[in-house]
Amino acid sequence: MNLHAMQRDFRRWLTAADVPAARRLAGADRAGLEVYQNNYRVQLVGCLETTYPHVRTYIGDAAFHRAAVHHVTRHPPRAWTLDAYGAGFERTLRALWPDNPDVHELAWLEWAQATAFVARDTVPLDPARLAAVDWDRARLDFAPSLHLARLTTNAADVWSALQAGAVGPDPAPAAALLPEPKGVAVWRRGFVTRLRVLDPLAYDALVLARAQRNLAAPCAMLVERLGDDDGVARAGALLADWIGSELLVRVSASRQP
Amino acid sequence: MPAHFPPPVFAGYGLGLRREHYRDFLETRVPVDFVEVISENFMVAGGQPLDILRRVRERHPVALHGVSMSVGSADGLRGDYLKRLKALVDAVDPLYVSDHLSWSRTGRFNAHDLLPLPWTDEALDVVCANIHRAQDTLGRAMLFENPSSYLAFAEALMPEWEFVARMCERTGCGLLLDVNNVYVSAANHGFDPFAYLDGIPAGRVRQIHLAGHSQGNGLLVDTHDQNVPDGVWSLYAHALTRCGSVATMIERDADIPPLADLLAELDVARQLGAAPALKEAA
């Protein structure tokens, strides 16, 4: 057997416990192959446990283990870094528990924070250098760690309670649908990841500003919804918050004429 | 003719840097001569891990130890991986850069484990080609570690130590000798661990790992979650007579004890390294 064929057989054994592949690799003595298969599965399940500690606490060890094994069986790792293996676990949870958006949204929050934690570093904006900015024409760049999503449940409250140590007799709040969806922003300020729930207007403005890379688009949206004076005032307040929270990390002259 | 040659010998004693001990290393003067970090944990865009590594590097020489190069992969190495590793090497200026004599990737699948190679001429050609590419990309010689193994292939044409010797000869790479892994593989496959130590090119060894293992179902398993056992210390004493004093460290990956416990284990290595028998052999 050449090296390519051996490595393909090993993959079949690890991912699917393929018996003919095992026979070609090791004959009748499978003790060694069992060690490798156990290591493979334990490592991947352990990775999911490390990446999603609050989901695990929230749904319980047994349910989490079932979901993790389901994911490992269907999604062999492809990235060179094990840290990437947590990507897509939210979709597995969605497939297993389609009627539990609180679980999917909690998983989204944990994955967003895991990726924000090692996102590219940025330097806070210097307010003194912003005085001369033409905000109507400026190009805005937001933190590379920023993740935005719309939540339909109280998953952010659940996350906060679990982060504060809610377990056992002092459990996280019960799952609940929100009266209306809210936005959530996850990003990193310095070395600390942040999570903030946003009212729908603030969320829409941030989504627009990041997509259009300017202040004009969110400002127009706010004026349309709130009127001239209130809309402009709200845009100014949001801009100040984006700068102070280090959501906005770069302001430069627009390349457009 | 190899384009690279093993880096100079660094005779010191170190520890693997683990998250549980970050605070110790950042806030106190830990009595080690170097630390080793897992390369992939720091091959990231930014954030606290890189800041911690930068601050630790200000205090100690750092060895980079990888687990994902997959130098035995018949599909070759990943260019994006090498590019990221090169960036880290350039940023850290490490004492050594090492990975394992194993494979983990085939096609788009990555097992994230140190899988065994058959000791064949074909595997040697693949390993050497991949090492050449890695060393040329990094612009320096690497060290490769002998992994523990739980499977021996019927196709093997030579013992592992002969494969290792030929790999060093053809590529100019150095060796990271994991004494525990020799112990584990010898027990699992029934070879003499002292013959292994006598068979490898001792002059290529630049770093030594000391660790513990567990008894599995009929096999020893390289769990790195135990103290270094007596049998591994005995092998280490023999390795010292062959290799001389090289960078030696305790490698603990699970059930991480307090730092003081690991430093006490490291002191045992120091005492063996200072033993009269070693001085006579040197």
Image (cartoon, coloured by chain):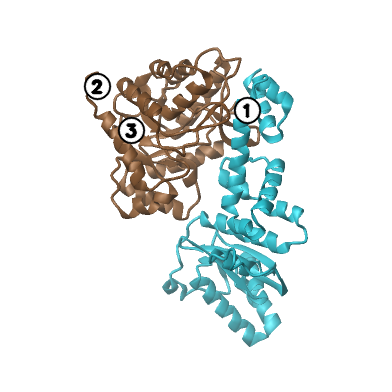
Chain colours: A cyan, B brown
Considering depth in this image, is A179 or A26 the residue closer to the camera?
A: A26
Q: Mark 3 Cα within 10 Å, few/some/many (few <14, many 20+)? A: many
Q: Dots 1 and 2: beta carbons under 8 Å?
A: no
Using the image, name the chain to which the residue with label 3 belongs.
B
Q: Nearer the viewer, mark 3 or mark 1?
A: 1
Please state the horizontal and vertical placement of residue B281, each as a whole percent of the image: 25, 19
| Amino acid on which disc 3 is placed | Ala
Label 3 to label 1: alpha-carbon separation: 33 Å
Q: Is residue A41 left or right of residue B201?
A: right
Residue A104 sits in quarter: bottom right
Residue at the spot 38% in from the left edge and 43% down from the top edge: B92
- Identify the residue at horizontal 66%, vertical 64% (top origin): A149
How would you rate the neighbour count of disc 1 (Cα within 10 Å): few for under 14, some for 14-19, many for 20 or more?
A: some
> Which disc number belongs to residue A33?
1
Element at badge 2? helix
Q: Amino acid at mark 1?
A: Leu
Q: How many marks overall?
A: 3
- Choose between A169 and B57: the one closer to the eye: A169
Residue linked to disc 3: B247
Which one is in front in this view, the residue at disc 3 or the one at disc 2?
Answer: 2
According to the image, label 2 marks what residue? B277
Extreme residue toward the top, this view: B157
Q: Quadrant of the C terminus of chain A?
A: bottom right
Image location (x, y in percent) of residue B138? 44, 34
